[in-house]
Structure formats: structure tokens, C-alpha cells
Image (cartoon, rainbow, N blue to C red):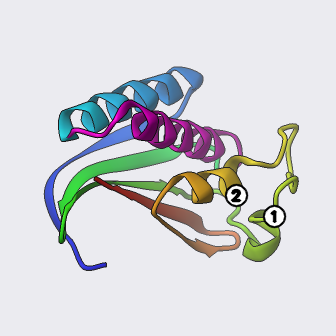
Amino acid sequence: MTSSVVTGETLAVRMEDDVVRVRQVTRRRAEELGFRLVDQTKIVTAASELARNTLVHGGGGHVHLSVVQAARPGLKLVFEDHGPGIPDVPRALQDGFTTGNGLGLGLSGSRRLMDEFSIDTQPGAYTRITVVKWL
């Protein structure tokens, strides 16, 4: 869906406290935009999982949150790191697949919670995950 950015901000993800801050700012922006509580929870859960992935698997990075406008308003989050990348994206999106100690539901669960989900990655260079929830 083609959209235009209305407002945006970038948050660093370098330590555990940053994951908490991403959750707080994401919830605040979702509330301000008028998302119902159920959708706020979905967005915040996806943001938390993806921020944690950025920190744990990507070695840190940032997230850019923006309010976008297309046929209706939405909240767009772009997580980016310059870690090892994802060598096998289809496998990484399977429930239960993990390279760490988690349940392997972060990527697949986030994809289910959001309306749009895309991964752009280059092994050995970067990972950029973009998610959008439309109001």
C-alpha cells in the first residue's frame, strides 16, 4: 500500500532499557492514533519482539516509528541493525525456529500481529524489518 509519512521519530536499541522505551513510545503513539486496546497490545507485542531481536541477534540498532497516511492512517515501525543478517528468511519465519534461547516465535508472531510485514536482509551486513498496522 502506498503511504505518506505524517510524523516520525527514531529510537536507539542498544540495551535492555531501550526495548522497554520502544514498547512505551509505541504504545503512546498507538493510543494517540486511536487504536483500540486489543490492537495497541498487538502492536506493542510485535514492537517488543522485534526490538529484542534487533538487540540480541543484530547486536543493536534502531527503530523508526512513523505515523503514515494512505487510505487510512497507520503506524509503521522499521527495525534496522548491522548484525549478521538472516541467511534463510523462510526458515527464520517458521514457528519454533530460533538461533537463540527463545521460543522461536518473535518473527512469525510479529508477522501475524501486524497488517504488513517485510524483511530486507543481507547476510553479514544488515537486517531491516518493516511492519505496519492500519487503523
In magenta segment, residue 134: no
Closer to us: 34 or 118: 34
Q: In which quarter of the image is residue 43?
A: top left
Closer to us: 126 or 112: 112
Q: In which quarter of the image is the N terminus?
A: bottom left
Q: Name the residue under label 2.
A: 108
Closer to us: 52 or 26: 26
- CB atoms at circles 2 and 1 under 8 Å apart? yes
Query: In this image, 132 relative to 66: left or right?
Result: right
**The disc labelled 2 sits on which kind of residue?**
Ser
- The 10 Å Cα crowd at callout 2, few under 14, some 14 to 19, many 20 or more, is some
Residue 41 in the image, given as x and y percentages of width and height: 48, 33
Main secondary structure along the magenta-highlighted residues: helix
Q: Is mark 1 on a helix, strand or loop?
A: loop
Residue 2 in the image, given as x and y percentages of width and height: 25, 79
Residue 126 in the image, given as x and y percentages of width and height: 58, 65
Q: Quadrant of residue 125?
A: bottom right
- Which residue does the image show at 28% across and 28% down from the upper left? 28
In magenta segment, residue 40: yes
Q: Name the residue under label 1.
A: 94
- Residue 125 numbered mark, or none: none
Query: In this image, 25 relative to 2: left or right?
Result: right
The region drawn magenta spans 34-57
- Which residue does the image show at 49% across and 56% down from the upper left? 114
- Which residue does the image show at 57% across and 46% down from the upper left? 50
User: First in sequence: mark 2 or mark 1?
Assistant: 1
Q: Is mark 2 on a helix, strand or loop?
A: helix
Residue 21 in the image, given as x and y percentages of width and height: 42, 25
**The disc labelled 1 sits on which kind of residue?**
Gln
Query: In this image, 63 relative to 15: left or right?
Result: left
